[in-house]
Image (spheres, rainbow, N blue to C red):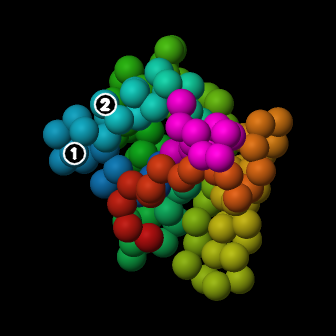
Amino acid sequence: SIHREGRAKAKVMILYLNNKVFCGQMNQLHNTVKLIRDEGIPIILVHEKDINKGGCSFGDIITQTPEDLKHDPYSLYAHDIAVSLYSAKRYQQVSLRQILKKIVMKHTDTVSYNNTEFIPLVGNI
């Protein structure tokens, strides 16, 4: 447990889902997701919608996801709905607010917004 000024920091992983999320990672991302789940750290799913940035259907993402992450004990897609990330400014702002809201909601009982530790995005936005 990480402490700063006597208060534990909350952790959250933001998993950026596009057409390359589980391709060519040599199992690194696969193993990281398993470790994060095993540690009980919440994962917030962000689904890229812009095809110029690797956006694809959610079905394509599920198809490339390793089988063990789809089922118990990991059940990557069973716990929450992914936030759609759009490129158009007005929609992108809504997406980013939804992501922030999910981060805060994961820790409302334990920490404030300023005391949340973020695990970096996987991939580029």
Q: Quadrant of the C terminus?
A: bottom left
Q: Position of residue 57 (x, y in %)?
A: 48, 54
Q: Which mark is residue 15?
A: none
Name the residue type under label 2: Asn
Residue sitting at the far front? 5
Q: Residue at x 73, y 66 (%)?
A: 97
Residue sitting at the far top? 72
Res 65 → quadrant? top left
Q: Position of residue 23 (x, y in %)?
A: 25, 47
Res 9 → quadrant? top right
What secondary structure is found at the residue carrying circle 2? Answer: helix
Question: Does residue 17 sit above or below 33 in this rendering?
Answer: below
Residue sitting at the far right? 109
Name the residue type under label 1: Gln
What range is drawn magenta here?
A: 1-14
Viewer-nearest residue: 94 or 58: 94
**Residue 102 falls inside the magenta stretch:** no
Question: Does residue 51 sit above or below 105 in this rendering?
Answer: below
Q: Residue at x 60, y 46 (%)?
A: 4
Q: Residue at x 54, y 30 (%)?
A: 1
Total numbered labels:
2
Q: Which residue is mark 2?
A: 31
**Residue 9 falls inside the magenta stretch:** yes
Q: Position of residue 62 (x, y in %)?
A: 44, 39
Of marks 2 and 1, which one's residue comes earlier in the chain?
1
